[in-house]
Amino acid sequence: MNELALSAIYCLLIAGGQTEMPHGYSAGYDMHMIRVDCETPTEVIEVGLDSRSSLDSIQQALFAAHLTGKKPVVLMIDRDGRVGPYETRIAAAAKIAGVEYRRTTRDFLIRWQMTRWLRHYKTAPNAAS
């Protein structure tokens, strides 16, 4: 599964937010737009995989928080079962910047999606009572 799919599982099924929320801003005379990976009523969550491409997650979360007035959060999705160099760097930067850092695993998110129906199962009314 790719980052977008894993982000959607976390956002929709766990955080109760909306994915890929657009927000416009102006720079100079031009209009620009960012997309927030996951947005809840109180948080903007930047989701990243445990790779070099996620090193800009703090900046993205902070800028989204600046535009929305919401709390910035970074969620790292671990794919190799260890805290590697990128998770370490991002966690340290998040702490310094005052950004909440969360970590989960790809396997957990996939299992959560696969077993969602078990958490929403409604039992039949008891006919004997």
Image (cartoon, helix red, strand yellow):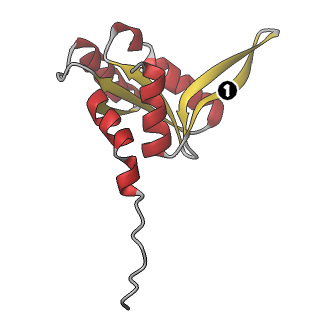
Q: Which of 84 and 7 is in front in this view?
A: 7
Q: In this view, does 114 lie to the left or right of 44?
A: left
Q: Name the residue under label 1.
A: 22
Tell me the amino acid under the disc marked 1: Pro
Kindly identify the residue that appears in the image at 41 percent across and 31 percent down: 99
Q: What is the quadrant of the C terminus in the image?
A: bottom left
Q: Is residue 96 left or right of residue 36?
A: left
Q: Nearer the viewer, residue 106 or 93?
A: 106
Answer with the quarter of the image where residue 91 lies: top left
Furthest residue in direction right, as rendered: 29
Kindly identify the residue that appears in the image at 50 percent across and 46 percent down: 16
Q: What is the quadrant of the N terminus in the image?
A: top left
Furthest residue in direction left, as rendered: 82
Q: In this view, does 9 lie above or below 117?
A: above
Binning the other alpha carbons within 10 Å of mark 1 as few (below 14), some (14 to 19) or many (20 upward) gives few
Furthest residue in direction bottom, as rendered: 129
Answer with the quarter of the image where residue 103 lies: top left
Q: In this view, does 58 lie above or below 99?
A: above
x and y percentages locating residue 97 in the rendered image: 40, 26
x and y percentages locating residue 68 in the rendered image: 63, 35
Kindly identify the residue that appears in the image at 28 percent across and 14 percent down: 86
x and y percentages locating residue 118 in the rendered image: 35, 54
**Element carrying mark 1:** strand
x and y percentages locating residue 88 in the rendered image: 24, 19
